[in-house]
Structure formats: structure tokens, C-alpha cells
Image (tube, helix red, strand yellow):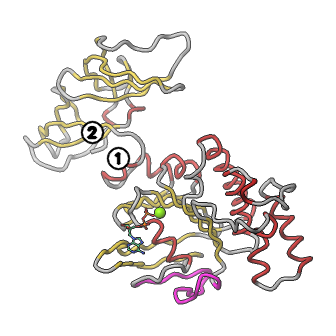
């Protein structure tokens, strides 16, 4: 049994099945993200783990204790929401100490712990301020300190960065992860942002319509997506049609060019199949692999470190590729004829 054990959780609201048989084990100290589009059931699973929502069926246990029937305040969890949800009429210090006061701890003890928490989040001077006197990023750090002050065993974060500006979002990512590692606290982080999930997590759970489509390390999720949904949701993807020539031997025609895949393809000769390919595995020019396709530059998007180029392929369709920006080389011109190349090993069937 894992430290945090989620078994066959289901949740229906009336006839609407929002979470369908969700099972996941999380190790002590692990940082796991739930990643998926809005409405796929991330918050509902998190609320069931936290004790804010009763499951229709299934069980949750923490460190071997079955907590399914326990209310939130007896589960030893800390929760942070997207909207900072600080008490506006309490100071920062009173907010952070709130859970300790409710638990009946003494004044001196609370003051010591609050100071420690403010130090941890890098705001040691701001204890006497009120929430409205803080920036969004500072308020969210205070919300984190308030969740952590009572020493929970599990930390639940529901899109805590979504309301913040891009720059702050990235710096708070690092800070949350540093604090989480320092404390060794088992954490679930909910987000719809794939970059956030991939960059922060030990493991990612990609959710789709109330189901965990794939559970894996960021490396596995990105490079070996288990379903088409995962492949499309995580990262940018080219979807290319090809004709099956010999399924068992893996012979296909891609934009008219014969290609042999590493393995047998599903389907039968004469059928159209769909292949997926990441833009960063396609090279502008020859030399990027055994498959070379002629075409023309159709779109150029300057993104800073990389330039994303879309090429209309002569044999039909178009393929997006990423090329590194180099200050001494001008970006490609729309309409220019080019070859693009790729390896058959990077084609996901
Ligand atoms: P996410 O957090 O992934 O955006 P949610 O877990 O909030 O998704 O919601 C999943 C689905 O459940 C949505 O279709 C939402 O409308 C529905 N839902 C959530 N909470 C309730 C509720 N209390 N009553 C009825 N439907 C709900
Ligand atoms: Mg949500």
C-alpha cells in the first residue's frame, strides 16, 4: 500500500459521472500533478482526497489509515486554492496561525511556528500586513504557509498559480517545489498547464473525462504518450496521414514517400493511418533522418529561442517543426522551397 492510496474513486452528480474509477498510489514525499483540461474532474478528485466531497464509491487512505469517512479537519491535509482565500480581516500572521489556534495551541507556540513559516516562504517582515496589502504572488505564498503551518501529512494544491502573472508563476513554481522538497511533504498539484506539470512533478497523471489516461514521469508522458489524447494534450503534435502498404512489415507511404517503420502497424494494406510527430524531431533541410520530404515554407512564428516553421509538404498535408534561433542567421522566408527530414523512429503510430 502506498503512503497516499486512492482506490477506485468514483463520483456522480445526479446522473453525471464526473470521476470514473480513479486509482493512484503516491509515495511519501512524492510530488504528483493532475493535468487535464477544464471539467475533466481534477478538482473533484482532489476534494475527495481532502475530505471536502464524499465519493460515490471508493476509498482513500493516508499512511495506512482509511480516511474515507473522516472530515477534512481530521485527515492531516493542507489545501491551497486558486483564489487565495485568505481571511481578509486577519493579518498575515493571524492567517498563517489560524489552523494552530483552532487546534488549541498556545500563543507562544503559535508565534514561533508562524515566524518559522514566514521565514520559509521568504516573507519574514510581513506578518502584520493585511492580505489586501500584498501582491497576488505574496498572498499565494501566505496561503501556502497557512496550509503548511499545522504540519499536514499531505499537501493539496488546486491550480494555485493560475491567477498569477506569467513571471511570478514561473518563480513560484520553483519556490513551491523547493519548499515541498525541504519538508518532504507528499503533494498533489492540480493544473491545466502542461509546462507546469512537466517541469514540477515526479509523476504526472493526465486526466480526461473523469479517467486517468496515463500515469508516468514527465519523460514518459511526453515521449511515450499512451493515448492519442495524451499525445495531443501534452506538447505540440503533428498528425500526418499515411497509406498502409504492408502492415505486418511496417511499410507505409508518407506524403508519397516509402517509409519502413520499426514495428508492425495496426490496420491492413490500403488503409489510411494517422502518425504523430513532435515538431522538435523534424529538421529543416536534409540530414535529420532517413525520411526526406520536399515542400514549401507556409508559416513562420518567431518564439524567441526557437522558430516554429510550418511547411506544406509536396505530397500533401503540412508539418510543423522547431528550429533554434541563431542571431547570425535570418529566419526562413514564407514561400521558399525546402526539404525537411526526420527519422522513422520518431513517428508515433
Ligand atoms: P476540473 O477541476 O478538472 O476543471 P471539476 O472536478 O471541477 O473539473 O468538474 C468536473 C465536472 O463535474 C464538471 O463537468 C463540473 O461541472 C461537474 N461538477 C463539479 N462539481 C459539481 C457539483 N457540486 N455539482 C454538479 N456538478 C459538478
Ligand atoms: Mg478545477
Residue behind mark 1: 232
- 116 and 281: which one is in front? 116
Verify whether residue 25 appears in magenta.
no
Provide the residue span drawn in magenta. 57-74
Ligand 1: does it lie within 8 Å of the C-beta at label 2? no
Q: Earlier in the sequence, mark 1 or mark 2?
A: 1
Left or right: where does residue 208 sit relative to residue 265?
right
Left or right: where does residue 225 sit relative to residue 270?
right
Picture coordinates of residue 326, whole percent (x, y): 53, 16
Left or right: where does residue 139 sit relative to residue 94?
left
Residue at image point 32% right, 80% down: 14
Residue at image point 55% right, 10% down: 328
Dot 2 lies on which element?
strand
Q: Which quadrant holds residue 283? A: top left
- 136 and 130: which one is in front? 130
Residue furthest to the bottom in view is 69
The circle drawn on residue 44 is: none
Picture coordinates of residue 175, whole percent (x, y): 70, 51
Please report contact status of discs 1 and 2: CB closer than 8 Å, yes or no.
Answer: yes
Dot 1 lies on which element?
helix
Picture coordinates of residue 110, whole percent (x, y): 85, 75
Residue behind mark 2: 239
Amino acid at each position: 500500500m502506498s503512503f497516499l492510496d486512492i482506490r477506485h474513486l468514483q463520483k456522480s452528480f445526479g446522473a453525471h459521472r464526473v470521476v470514473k474509477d480513479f486509482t493512484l498510489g503516491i509515495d511519501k514525499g512524492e510530488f504528483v500533478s493532475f493535468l487535464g483540461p477544464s471539467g475533466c474532474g481534477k478538482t473533484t478528485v482532489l476534494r475527495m482526497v481532502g475530505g471536502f466531497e464524499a465519493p460515490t464509491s471508493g476509498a482513500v487512505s493516508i499512511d495506512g489509515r482509511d480516511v474515507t469517512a473522516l472530515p477534512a479537519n481530521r485527515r492531516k491535509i493542507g489545501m491551497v486554492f486558486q483564489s487565495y482565500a485568505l481571511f481578509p480581516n486577519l493579518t498575515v500572521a493571524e492567517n498563517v496561525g489560524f489552523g494552530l489556534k483552532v487546534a488549541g495551541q498556545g500563543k507562544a507556540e503559535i508565534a514561533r511556528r508562524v515566524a518559522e513559516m514566514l521565514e520559509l516562504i521568504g516573507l519574514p517582515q510581513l506578518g502584520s500586513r493585511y492580505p489586501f496589502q500584498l501582491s497576488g504572488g505574496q498572498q499565494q505564498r501566505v496561503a501556502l504557509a497557512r496550509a503548511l503551518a499545522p504540519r499536514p501529512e499531505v499537501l493539496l494544491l488546486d491550480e494555485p498559480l493560475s491567477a498569477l502573472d506569467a513571471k511570478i508563476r514561473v518563480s513560484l513554481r520553483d519556490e513551491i517545489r523547493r519548499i515541498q522538497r525541504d519538508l518532504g511533504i507528499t503533494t498533489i498539484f492540480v493544473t491545466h498547464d502542461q509546462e507546469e506539470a512537466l517541469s514540477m512533478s515526479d509523476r504526472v497523471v493526465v486526466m480526461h473525462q473523469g479517467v486517468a489516461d496515463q500515469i508516468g514521469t514527465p519523460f514518459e508522458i511526453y515521449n511515450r504518450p499512451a493515448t492519442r489524447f495524451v499525445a495531443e494534450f501534452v506538447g505540440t503534435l503533428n498528425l500526418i496521414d499515411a497509406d498502409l502498404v504492408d502492415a505486418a512489415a511496417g511499410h507505409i507511404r508518407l506524403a508519397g514517400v516509402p517509409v519502413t517503420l520499426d514495428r508492425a502497424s495496426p490496420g491492413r494494406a490500403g488503409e489510411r493511418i494517422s502518425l504523430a510527430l513532435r515538431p522538435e524531431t523534424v529538421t529543416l533541410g536534409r540530414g535529420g533522418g532517413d525520411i526526406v520530404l520536399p515542400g514549401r515554407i507556409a508559416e513562420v512564428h518567431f518564439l524567441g529561442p526557437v522558430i516554429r516553421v510550418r511547411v506544406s509538404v509536396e505530397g500533401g498535408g503540412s508539418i510543423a517543426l522547431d528550429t533554434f534561433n541563431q542571431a547570425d542567421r535570418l529566419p526562413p522566408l514564407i514561400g521558399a522551397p525546402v526539404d525537411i527530414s526526420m527519422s522513422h523512429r520518431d513517428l508515433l503510430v
